[in-house]
Amino acid sequence: KSYKITVQNTGQEFVVEPEKIPYGRHGIPGSILDTISKTDSELIDHACGGVQACSTCHIIVEKGLDSCNEISDREDDYLDQTPGLTLESRLSCACVPDGSEDIVIRIPDWNRNEVKE
């Protein structure tokens, strides 16, 4: 069953079709970064290429956090270095929803890449 990931800041919606995962280029297969980067690879910064080696892809999951995988020790270590950390913070490269509900995320204002090169 497909589900949506909505980016609250921009209103963009991304439809996830589980049978097509992995989409390909960035993050854990099925992660929020994997899904979004299939059509907009610059919306969420990801300096390390989505391999859980930085915290630039920090997002805040506003809705649907319970349907996402648990935070790994590695992700937790990088989240500790993230400015603006909240209880709903995740790295988009490591956050994998199970598809049981739609997801709403917010990209922190300081982290949004508004300049497309």
Image (cartoon, helix red, strand yellow):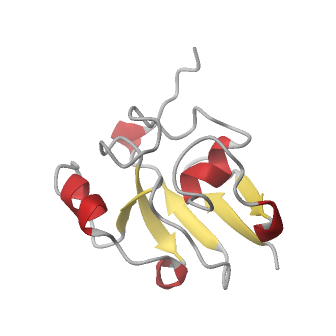
Q: How many marks?
A: 0
Above or below, comparing residue 41 to residue 7 in the picture: above
Q: Position of residue 83 (x, y in %)?
A: 21, 48
> Is residue 47 left or right of 103 when viewed as pictured?
left
Above or below, comparing residue 103 to residue 91 in the picture: below
Q: Position of residue 82 (x, y in %)?
A: 23, 50
- Residue shown at 75%/63% (left/top)? 16
> Is residue 56 left or right of 20 when viewed as pictured?
left
Q: Residue furthest top?
A: 117
Q: Position of residue 53 (x, y in %)?
A: 31, 43
> Which quadrant is home to the C terminus?
top right
Q: Quadrant of residue 13?
A: bottom right
The front one of 88 and 41 is 41
- Residue shown at 44%/59% (left/top)? 94
> Which quadrant is home to the N terminus?
bottom right
- Residue shown at 27%/66% (left/top)? 86
Above or below, comparing residue 90 to residue 35 in the picture: below
- Residue shown at 50%/77% (left/top)? 68
> Can residue 8 be seen in the rendering of this structure?
no
> Is residue 75 left or right of 83 when viewed as pictured?
right
The front one of 105 and 21 is 21
> Can residue 109 be seen in the rendering of this structure?
yes
Q: Position of residue 87 (x, y in %)?
A: 28, 73
